[in-house]
Amino acid sequence: MAFILVKMSFITYYWRMSFAENLRDELEYQGMQVKELAEKTGLSINTLNKYRPGSKVVPTIDNALKIARVLKVSLDYLATGNFTAGKYGGRNEILKISNKMRKFSDSDIRTVKSVVDALNEKYK
């Protein structure tokens, strides 16, 4: 019985630390403020602040799913930091493409940007 309690404590600690750090990193990556996330998820700012690094509160699965959906990331990513390959490989694939573009000329980058902007309009 004691082993199960220790194991659950470790799992809870790991989930809390990973989730908090990944949430913080994803908000920063997307340039989203907690206030905006609160509006889009329907969760209060106080609730979301409880999931930030340094806190000891673990989100419920329902709340974690709401956050993941709004941020357009998997629950697996928020919990572990691992990307689950989506339709096109998720953010990892986007980062690979971005890294390849570092050697592009300014003109090439403007061309890529115009294509991305046009596709973005198509999927609005």
Image: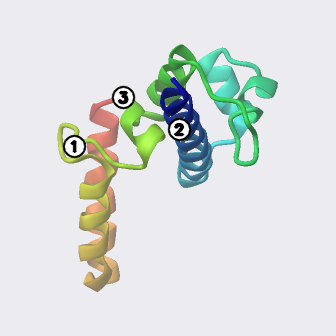
Determine whether 99 is above or below 117 in the image.
Answer: below
Residue 124 got which mark?
A: 3
Amino acid carrying label 1: it is Ala
| Marks 3,2: beta carbons within 8 A | no
User: Around disc 2, counting alpha carbons within 10 Å, would you say few (fewer than 14), some (14 to 19), or many (20 or more)?
Assistant: some
Q: Residue at x 75, y 47 (%)?
A: 54
Residue 15 got which mark?
A: 2
Please state the horizontal and vertical placement of residue 73, each as a whole percent of the image.
40, 36
Q: Residue at x 53, y 38 (%)?
A: 15
Separation of marks 1 and 2 at Cα, in angstroms: 21 Å
Determine whether 42 is above or below 120 in the image.
Answer: above
The part of the image, by quadrant, that contains residue 107 is: bottom left
Amino acid carrying label 3: it is Lys
Separation of marks 3 and 1 at Cα, in angstroms: 22 Å
Amino acid carrying label 2: it is Trp
| Marks 3,1: beta carbons within 8 A | no
119 relative position to 58: left or right: left
Residue toward you, 15 or 93 = 15
User: Reading the chain from its start, which is encountered first: label 3 or label 1?
Assistant: 1
User: Reading the chain from its start, which is encountered first: label 1 or label 2?
Assistant: 2
Please state the horizontal and vertical placement of residue 77, each as a whole percent of the image.
40, 42
Q: Please identify the residue farthest to the front as the structure is shown.
A: 1
The part of the image, by quadrant, that contains residue 50 is: top right
Per the image, label 1 sits on a secondary structure element best described as: loop
Q: Residue at x 68, y 22 (%)?
A: 39
User: Reading the chain from its start, which is encountered first: label 3 or label 2?
Assistant: 2
Please state the horizontal and vertical placement of residue 61, each as a whole percent of the image.
50, 18
Q: Which residue is mark 1?
A: 85
